[in-house]
Amino acid sequence: MTTVQETATTSAWSDKPLPHNAEQWIERAAEVAAILRRDAVERDRAGATPLAEVRLLKDAGLVTLLGPVEHGGAGQRWETAYRVIREVAAGDGSIGQLLGYHYLWAWAARLVGTEAQIAAVEELYTKNTFFFGGAVNPRDNDLVIADEGDQIVYNGRKSFSTGSKVSDLTVLEGVLDGTGKHIFAIVPSQQEGIVFHDDWDNLGQRLTESGSVSVNNVRVDWSDAAGYVDKEFVERTYSTLNLPTIQLVFANFYLGIARSALETATAYTRDRTRPWPYGGDNKESAADEWYILDAYGDLQSKLWAAEELANSAGAELSALLHAPRENLTPEARGHAAVRIAAAKQRAIDTGLEIGTKIFEVTGARATSNKVGLDIFWRNLRTHSLHDPVAYKRREVGRFALLGELPEPTWYT
């Protein structure tokens, strides 16, 4: 069996042309997922820095999926990126998350930057196949920015820095000292002023390199402060799409994890689960057990429904993301946000149900650590706590009952 490390070393796609349409890119992502799936459990247990996994994403061309064609990118749309995230997550939930966060941060210049910043960032990361991480957590107020004339200086610590050691570029977020102004900037990850602490030791999503980071005297020119002109941020409704965009990233890698859980369980049931011999309606195969068929039918139906809702929300948001920035209205933004809130809660509820129910239809022997069915529930349970799903239900409820659209916040 070829491992991720071996595949990344030999570059499986070195003699193949890049895909040229959305369908082919999704197929390419499925190829990556098949490689990741082979040893996902073993890599999860080892918890090593996923350098080979990110190399795999780069070699497959997925890192520059949204990058401009003129700089060597695929120039694809966000609705395709969401499907790619889902496919990769079906192979390994952690790597699906890393790729999804990368896409968000690679698009960050378009969300908040000036035209000059957009052009510079997209050329930089696309031509060099750079991978993004992000030290962004608005609930942390401990990254302080000092204004030193033509430059700003970041100092402090962030609790989370997803992508940390596997990233080429890091998005920093902090608050300008003495003000409430948040400033984003893109900086090289590997520099003396950024220290990753390797302290990510959580229940799931173990390979996301999401530990804490210290930032010491990292200097950025004011001209590179995202979206700032003459030290003032240029407000746009489009800038508020960052939260719906990342929330739908979440929903899609949750769905990839859920699909992989269901596929892994059905394969185990077909090959290894034994029928129950004491029910009075004994079957020769577990695949003929009515309660097993009932359970799989229910779970598959719910997953299909959740996927279609995510696809529809993705198409709606993608149309906004790829339209001229000045065209976005608060109403269109709010409608997309409430649909994404609905998609996210469906993905969480369905994914957690699948992650739990599969043990009932695979049997006691499926709890063996060698089987690794626990990885799906652990991954979903860990990341789905990012922000309370109850607030997503409330947003949808206020829309359904009162016709109110969600207002932009750091989590909506």
Image (cartoon, rainbow, N blue to C red):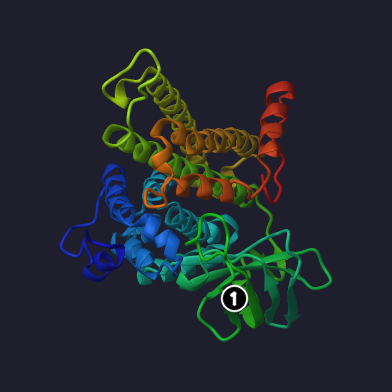
User: Residue 57: horizontal and vertical position, in percent?
Assistant: 35, 61
| Secondary element type, mark 1 | loop
Q: Say which quadrant the C terminus sits in.
A: top right
Q: Please tell me which residue lies in front, 291 or 241.
A: 291
Give the answer, above or below, for where 378 lies relative to 67. Answer: above
Q: Is residue 106 among what the camera can see?
A: yes
Residue that appears at 43% across and 38% down: 364
Residue 264 placed where, x, y %?
Answer: 35, 41
Q: Which three-letter amino acid code belongs to the residue tagged 1?
A: His
* Quadrant, the N terminus: bottom left
At a point 46% along the width and 32% down the height, the residue shown is: 360
Q: Residue at x 58, y 51 (%)?
A: 382
Q: Which residue is mark 1?
A: 197
Q: State whether residue 209 is above or below residue 313.
A: below
Kindly indicate the quadrant of the structure image that contains residue 346: top right
Q: Residue furthest right?
A: 178
Residue 384 in picture, x, y percent from top left: 59, 46
Whether residue 311 appears in this view of the structure is no
Farthest residue to the front: give it. Answer: 278
**Would you call the spot at circle 1 few (<14 residues within 10 Å), some (14-19), or many (20 or more)?**
some
Q: Position of residue 160 (x, y in %)?
A: 62, 65
